[in-house]
Image (cartoon, rainbow, N blue to C red):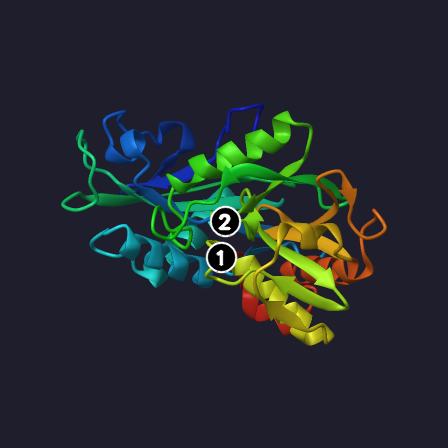
Amino acid sequence: MAKSTGNEYDGITAYLEGDFRPLADAKVSVMTHAFLYGTATFEGIRAYWNADEQQLYALKVTEHLERLRASCKILLMDPLPEVEAVKGIVVELLKRNAFKEDVYVRPSVYKSTKAIGVKLHGLENDLYVISVPFGDYIDTATGIRCATVATRRTSDLAIPARAKAAGNYVNSAFSKSEAGLNGFDEAIVLTEAGKVSEGSAENLFMVRGGKLVTPGVNDDILEGITRAGIIEIAAELGIPVVERQIDRSELYISDEIFLVGTGAQVSPVIEVDHRSVGTGKIGELTKRIQSRYFDAVRGKVPAYKHWLTPIY
């Protein structure tokens, strides 16, 4: 089984430009266009270890790769990646690494031409896939403190958030650091119009009056795979979901808030801008949704097996 040692990932296999190779040897030139200009798109996919079944379940692989293909189209990447072909690479890579723990998988299509010059067209693209052990990205157990930040989410007319492009995440990094350096755990980012968009790299749900409220796809959000899963769980639990704009001040009087995403999973928010969310503790609806989600992703709920790709 592949094991990590400090910052080095000894014995882990990666896929790069048509070959499986040691992760330490998966390198590109500093002249690569994606390195110079951020012209790459990627997906983050989690795979969850079920110790009782001795099985690793990869979560929503097809949905992630369909979004990868859509992002490639927006970034003028030709030819577009074939979903089933990339899925085969992801599954084979996980089998080769033989993980028996939770894992993060990142497939990325990037502009591989070695050239200086700002553009998207007329460039070659290639694929890499890496997989590494991965735990919590942000806290999921005790609740996090968030701040709305001055940094605004890039608009669809600037760098569209629905394209999961590497360059977009400079905007996310500004947001995350603004919140972190001011003593908060995570950022909540507003649109140019001042409406709630999402976290630095997570979709947002708010609870008011027993309903889940979440910004719509026209509020400069990433059209989240986990977000769609939470809406599916809410329907099963009989919790109404409303997609609409949210004002910043509405967060202050919400009953509950949580952030969701591949990295974040389901992360409860207990404070926004020094104001307690609800009682200041993790809310009951959040607990119900979080519990169902974590059972589902580990293969413990038959109704959600369609989310999962067993690796072994």
Q: Nearer the viewer, residue 113 or 121?
A: 121
Disc assigned to residue 219:
1
Identified by mark 2, the residue type is: Thr
Disc assigned to residue 265:
none
What residue occupies the far right of the structure in this picture?
A: 279
Q: Residues within 10 Å of mark 2 (few under 14, many from 20)?
A: some
Residue at the spot 45% in from the left edge and 37% down from the top edge: 171
Indicate the quadrant containing the N terminus: top left, top right, bottom left or bottom right: top right
What residue occupies the far left of the structure in this picture?
A: 122
Specify the quadrant of the image occupied by residue 117.
Answer: top left
Q: Is residue 63 above or below residue 11?
A: below
Work out whether mark 1 precedes mark 2 in sequence or the reverse, and give the earlier one. Answer: 2
Q: Residue 222: percent from the left, percent from the top?
A: 47, 54
Q: Secondary structure at mark 2?
A: loop
Q: Residues within 10 Å of mark 1 (few under 14, many from 20)?
A: many
Location of mark 2 (residue): 191
- How far separated are the C-alphas under marks 1 and 2? 7 Å
Identified by mark 1, the residue type is: Asp
Indicate the quadrant containing the C terminus: top left, top right, bottom left or bottom right: bottom right
Residue at the spot 41% in from the left edge and 32% down from the top edge: 23
Q: Residue 43: percent from the left, percent from the top?
A: 44, 49
Q: Residue 191: percent from the left, percent from the top?
A: 50, 49
Q: Nearer the viewer, residue 123 or 182?
A: 182
Q: Secondary structure at mark 1?
A: loop
Q: Is residue 51 above or below residue 20?
A: below
Residue 192 visible, this angle: yes
Residue at the spot 58% in from the left edge and 23% down from the top edge: 6
Q: Nearer the viewer, residue 80 or 187?
A: 187
Q: Nearer the viewer, residue 75 or 31?
A: 75
Q: Residue 196: percent from the left, percent from the top?
A: 57, 52
CB within 8 Å, label 1 to label 2: yes
Residue 1 visible, this angle: no
